[in-house]
Image: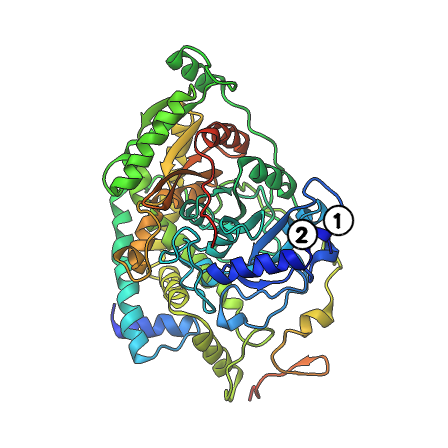
Amino acid sequence: MEAEELQTTARMARLSLSTAEEERLGRAVERMLAYCSHMASLPVDDLEPTTHALLTKNRLRPDESPGGQSADALLANAPEREDRFILIPNVL
Amino acid sequence: MPGSLDGSWRERASARDAAVGAFLQLDPSIGAADSAASGPLSGTTFGVKDNIAVRGYQLTCGSRLLEGVVSPYTATAVERLQRAGAVVAGKTNLDEFGMGSSTENSAFKRTLNPFDHGRVPGGSSGGSAAAVAAGIVDFALGSDTGGSVRQPASFCGLFGLKPTYGAVSRYGLVAYASSLEVIGVLARSVDLVERVFAVMRGEDPRDHSSLPWESAARPARAAKAAKAAKGGARGKTAPLCVGLPRECAGEGLCPEVRRTLEATKERLAGLGHAVAEVDLPTLEHVVAAYYVIATAEASANLARFDGIRYGRRAGGAVNPEELVLASRSAGFGDEVKLRILLGTYVLRSGFQDQYYLRAQKVRTAIRADFARVFDSVDLLLMPVYPVPPFAPGSAEADPFAQKLADVYTCSANLAGLPALAFPAAVEAGLPIGMQLLAPPFAEDRLFEACRGLEKIFPSPDPGAP
């Protein structure tokens, strides 16, 4: 894989790669892609894709809160906080 | 806290854990009050893989990115076990986000195989397997996305169940590959695996992919064929017709595993079951389809980890975009980055048809292959892993070799089938397991067959640490 292709993919995945990672992970990704391209030998044009093995239809629940979640317990995991707000660096 | 988990329990558990490093957090006092005083599982303790939520315990997924995160809620599967009287002992080590087959991809510690401390316990639920095999807990929960319950069970001489997809709620399981994974159980007896599964299973309104569990009946045709082949039952249970895919029996297995497969065939025949060779030609494509689908789903599922709402945040970022980039780049390990990159690539426009769409169609072919085979047999016998427990740094420990070795396990995940790994040999002091696969919701058939095998070859004991 071209270094540029890898860097484009990494940007989309929100990862920044060091030079060493670029080389190491680039090689590993390329090896997996080469291996996976062997699927082309199986004729599948007439087949429908499977997204889930056993689910046949989407299921919805009423749009109501099931309760039981504590906002305080969720906020307690935030790395930077001011009162009940999660802090992030300036957007602008 | 139950009297059985007093000081002497803690002392013994800590000493055993110190020898193998199974737990990332070992403390039954945190969740003990959430367990019922009595129930069908009272008196039992269990370990929970650290990608399954238990209120008050950490939830790191073996990742630096989630170091220090404490779960505010409990997974449905765990909650049901607590209601049945079982007590959580702690959180077990794993390959980061369940990605690996040796537990070496944990950011926090190495877990050793209780049978040989120079070998890995398997993975990704390696901490769960080591915790049970070392006698620290009665059973442990793992997650199985491509073999992550069955392979460590096999490496540590245990029974390991990967239930039918959707049979156990995934609510509270940190998502890696949502269409493939399921919470499973590892224990030293078929009976305990069955009892735990009976408590955990069933539809859950909090997981839209969960399904009501009803035992699948045996088709009359297969039962008749088995009876005809063996001239009637010799054991207590009706004979089963067990298929052995030709593609599993030859090349690719090391001599120890091949011998174990042969011995298992003979044991099944001795129990009155018929063993017949079958064809499963799509097996050669399962690893490719599995890694395309699993990494594509992983790239989407792991997009939520941004260092903003929870977990470790990289310092010094001047804007939110940089914060996310720096936190993810510093927080994820190599294997996770590799899978995110691969998954992102196969979903990119221009490559999607070639990889992701094709893999989904191959998955359809794999499902059809299994459906055809299960028209004529009740169960399938397959190896779990092509080699016995390996040593860190060996050729078998190479990450690419580990991926190829998923060939026998990941097909059950692609097809949503239940599979039960069982101990079948100890060679040179190392356990080797085999597995049986069944049609969806036919877990009872797996238990029935493995109860017979367990009488001949029970779960081996690694001995004192």
Q: In the image, are marks 2 and 1 on the same chain?
A: yes
Residue B260 drawn at (x, y percent): 33, 36
Q: CA distance from mark 2 to mark 1?
A: 9 Å
Name the residue tied to disc 1. Answer: B36
| Picture layout, residue B190 above or below residue A78 | above
* Precedes in sequence: disc 2 or disc 1: 1
Q: Residues within 10 Å of mark 1 (few under 14, many from 20)?
A: some
Residue B299 drawn at (x, y percent): 44, 63
Name the residue tied to disc 2. Answer: B87
User: Which quadrant of the structure image shows residue A14?
Assistant: bottom left
Q: Amino acid at mark 1?
A: Ala
Residue B232 drawn at (x, y percent): 44, 11
Which residue shows up at 54% across the image and 66% down it? B60
> What is the number of the mark on residue B64?
none
In the depicted view, which residue is nearer to us: A68 or B4? B4
Residue B31 drawn at (x, y percent): 69, 59
Q: Amino acid at mark 2?
A: Val
Label 1 residue SS = loop
* Chain for numbered disc 1: B
Can see residue A64? no
Label 2 residue SS = strand
Q: Is residue B120 left or right of residue B53?
A: left
| Picture layout, residue A73 above or below residue B232 | below
